Image (cartoon, rainbow, N blue to C red):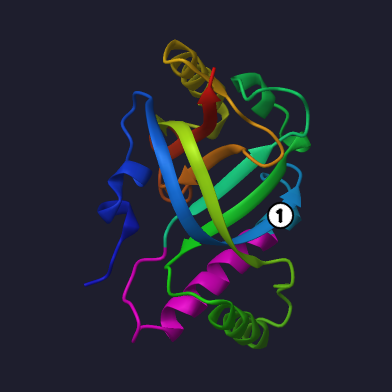
Amino acid sequence: MNIDYKKTEKELYQPKTRPSIIDVPRMLFIAVDGKGNPNTSAEYSSAIEVLYGLSYTIKMGNKDVLEYVVPPLEGFWYTGDDSNGIGEIILDKNKFIWTALIRQPDFVTTDIFEKAKSALAKKKPNLDTSEARLETIDEGLCVQVMHIGQYDDEPATVAMLDRFAVQNGYTIDINNTRRHHEIYLSDPRKVTPEKLKTVLRLPIKLS
């Protein structure tokens, strides 16, 4: 039986449509950094291809260790300004500083990762894997919610998260190390925009 984190760790991947507080545990990821509008950036498209290529190379090469479903694409988003994360900061997509990432099982070591990079480079020599890295992320205390609908409608949901945090004694804690986080549960090629499911998560701290 394939392990599917979306089903075994529902608190992380299947929050309700009303906000909640969560303490996110340490997890292992493959990550790629970049800048610019994800809708128009060739850099972003390349990063996604690298992430999926490496993730599936690791999965197929280690079936004897663990059978699992490759987790969904995620993204950390930041604009580099002084905003605290309220909805308006995500309107100008050209200002985005992003980290695209896909979670990995805990058995993945640096050696396994490097072997996957070599294998993918041989299979797709035109794909630049040099910017990909293996990273453990300890996200910590956050407020999250399931956003259903278009990505462009997220600002209202982010503002709702901000209000919920304040009402419960917290403030949004976005900075250059803690960022707006999204988990993409739907394939936009197969799901209509109004039915897209995206986990929105913001770091918080006590007021």
Residue that protrudes farthest toward the front in the picture: 206
Residue lying at the far left in this picture: please name it: 1
* Residue 202 coordinates in the image, percent (x, y): 53, 32
Q: Quadrant of residue 136?
A: bottom right
Q: Position of residue 207 (x, y in %)?
A: 54, 17
Q: Residue placed at 33% from the left, 70% from the top?
A: 68
Residue under the image location 44 percent in, 11 percent down: 167
Q: Is residue 154 left or right of residue 79?
A: left
- Which residue type carries mark 1? Asp
Quadrant housing residue 60: bottom left
Residue stretch in magenta: 46-70
* Residue 81 rendering spot, x and y as whole percentages: 78, 28
State the predominant SS element of the stretch in magenta.
helix
Q: Which residue is mark 1?
A: 33
Q: Is residue 119 visible?
A: yes
Q: Position of residue 185 (x, y in %)?
A: 41, 47
Q: Residue drawn at (65%, 20%), measured in percent from left and top? A: 88
Mark 1 residue crowding within 10 angstroms, few (<14) / some (14–19) / many (20+): some
Q: Quadrant of the N terminus?
A: bottom left
Viewer-proximal residue among 206 and 98: 206
Count of labels in the image: 1
- Helix, strand or loop at label 1? It is strand
Q: Residue at x 45, y 85 (%)?
A: 61
**Residue 201, magenta (yes or no):** no
